[in-house]
Amino acid sequence: MATYAPGVGPDPSRVAGVDLGIIHPYAVAGRDGEGLLVSGRAVRAEHRMHLADTKTRRTVARRAPKPGQRGSRRWREYRRRARLVEGRHKRRVRQAQHEAAGMVVSWAVEQRIGVLKVGDP
């Protein structure tokens, strides 16, 4: 738990509304017209790059072994590579979302916001 000097910490009477979205993951509106708009460009770019990469690797998937068949080394290597790429994609998206949420929290602390109301403002 963070400790603050008197008069510097979050004030429970200060409230900000947070609207969740896709283009902008977080749009925050505070008192006196203060606000924050967090860009979701990093997440959208990662999704687009991942889709393009997946499409280029898709040609091998048509030669998949039938159920019950062992599969070749090439197929196993393809599957291994696909798992690695999926894991990397998930980690990158999660990190971008984490950084966006961190921006909202740091802004709220900076503005001495005590309560964040999440939802449709």
Image: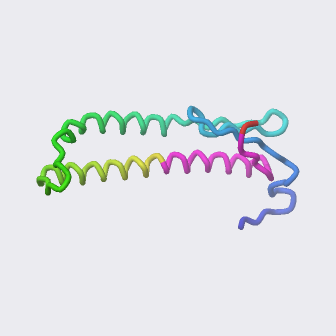
In this picture, residue 84 sits left or right of residue 68? right
Query: Could you tell me residue 86's position as x and y percent?
Result: 35, 49
Query: Could you tell me residue 12's position as x and y percent?
Result: 85, 54
Residue 99 magenta: yes
Which quarter of the figure is the C terminus placed in? top right
Q: Which residue is drawn at 24% across and 37% down?
A: 58
Magenta segment: 94-119
State whether the magenta stretch is mostly helix, strand or loop: helix
Which quarter of the figure is the N terminus placed in? bottom right
Query: Could you tell me residue 66's position as x and y percent?
Result: 17, 49
Residue 45 magenta: no
Q: Residue at x 82, y 46 (%)?
A: 15
In this picture, residue 116 sits left or right of residue 90? right
**Against 72, is 48 above or below?**
above
**Against 118, is 37 above or below?**
above
Q: How many marks?
A: 0
The colouring scheme, among rainbow, by chain, secondary structure or one colour, is rainbow
